Amino acid sequence: MILRTFGWSFAVTAAGLAFAAWQWGWEAFGIVLILSILEISLSFDNAVVNAGILKKMNAFWQRIFLTIGIMVAVFGMRLVFPVVIVAISAEVGPIEAVQLAIQEPGRYEDLVTDAHPAIAAFGGMFLLMIFLDFVFEDRDIKWLGWLERPLAKLGRIDMLSVCIALVVLLVTAMTFATHAHVSTGHADKTSTVLLSGVAGLITYLVVGGLSGYFEDKLEEEEEHEHEEEEKARAEGKPVSVVGLAGKAAFFLFLYLEVLDASFSFDGVIGAFAITNHIFWMALGLGIGAMYVRSLTVYLVRQGTLDDYVYLEHGAHYAIGALAAILLITIQHQISEIITGLVGVFLIAASFLSSVRRNRSLETSEAKVPTSDEKTEASSGV
């Protein structure tokens, strides 16, 4: 099972590290390996959240997520995305941006760093909306009941998450961005942060809304098809099945890709603390992204989220923490180690809570007498 799920990740790791050592030497080998570990540690919460969405898809779309999806993740976000940022910031073409990355890596890093407020605002708002919509939803299973119960009651207010997100964006733009301008003397990023944050919010509403709409349509269609099958079976007639699974799965897939893009922002930016080499960065982060993809599928196929019911809660709290960290980094620099450890701590805590819950349920079930035991007791045996 592990080899079947992680086989491609192992193969890509071996090929990528071998290529780095052959092409650039052992220094590149070490840096690519470090970047791979960095990406995995920063994105474990991403895998848990992705698994909660991916389990709604069939095997075909899971394969699409592992093939076409990984191409988008590796080449799109880890290679093309930094180049696009530099091209826009420096007002040059993509080819010139690649040449800049190869010939002037220091200036390339400065341009990406200068674009960080826009990246952080977009990704931070997208992730914040995911967190808010999760905590404001009334769920049967609650991890931190003392916190989640009152939040679920507040969630009955329409559009509350959007209002809170906009307030957070406004406060962020008027404090962090403005203060950074005054203290560092750099250009005022207030309008940039506002526009990028609103763009992140709109992206979440559009993509999330479309995926939710088609998911609801899929459920309605499945109910209708079930009724038609029952009717046709009773009449002895064949049933013509027309499903909307393709549309529903496509928009869920699109939502997953945007979600992965938002999660990858901190990894891409953090990678510049280790290297300025664009190809080393893409190779290392790409290997890490492969493991995140494989881990997502592994969690789905093993039913881990069903067995450890608080994992999804921990991952969403990690998303909220990452959203806050991204917004704070508009002004203050935060180590990627802290970012990764926060997510790992929250997921580990939710996993341990799930284990304790399962043990408690097993103990309770063991104490409940079976029907045979009740019969024996009543008969005096």
Image (cartoon, rainbow, N blue to C red):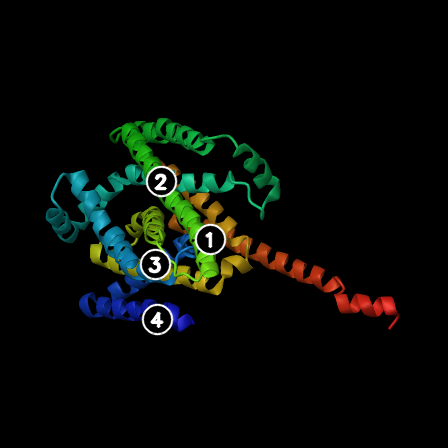
Picture residue at 41% right of the left edge, 59% below the top = 296
Q: For mark 2, what is the residue?
A: 204
Q: How far apart are marks 2 and 1 (CA)?
A: 34 Å
| Label placed on residue 61 | 3
Q: In this view, does 17 lie above or below 157?
A: below
Name the spot of residue 335 as percent of width and height, x first.
Answer: 39, 47
Q: Which of marks 4 and 3 is in front?
A: 3
Q: How far apart are marks 3 and 2 (CA)?
A: 21 Å
Name the spot of residue 113 as percent of width and height, x first.
Answer: 26, 42
Residue 83 appears anywhere in the view: yes
Q: For mark 4, what is the residue?
A: 7
Looking at marks 4 and 3 on the same chain, the residue that comes earlier in the sequence is marked by: 4
Looking at marks 4 and 2 on the same chain, the residue that comes earlier in the sequence is marked by: 4
Task: Tell me the element at label 4.
Answer: helix
Picture residue at 34% right of the left edge, 54% below the top = 242
Q: How far apart are marks 1 and 4 (CA)?
A: 41 Å
Name the spot of residue 32 as percent of width and height, x first.
Answer: 28, 62
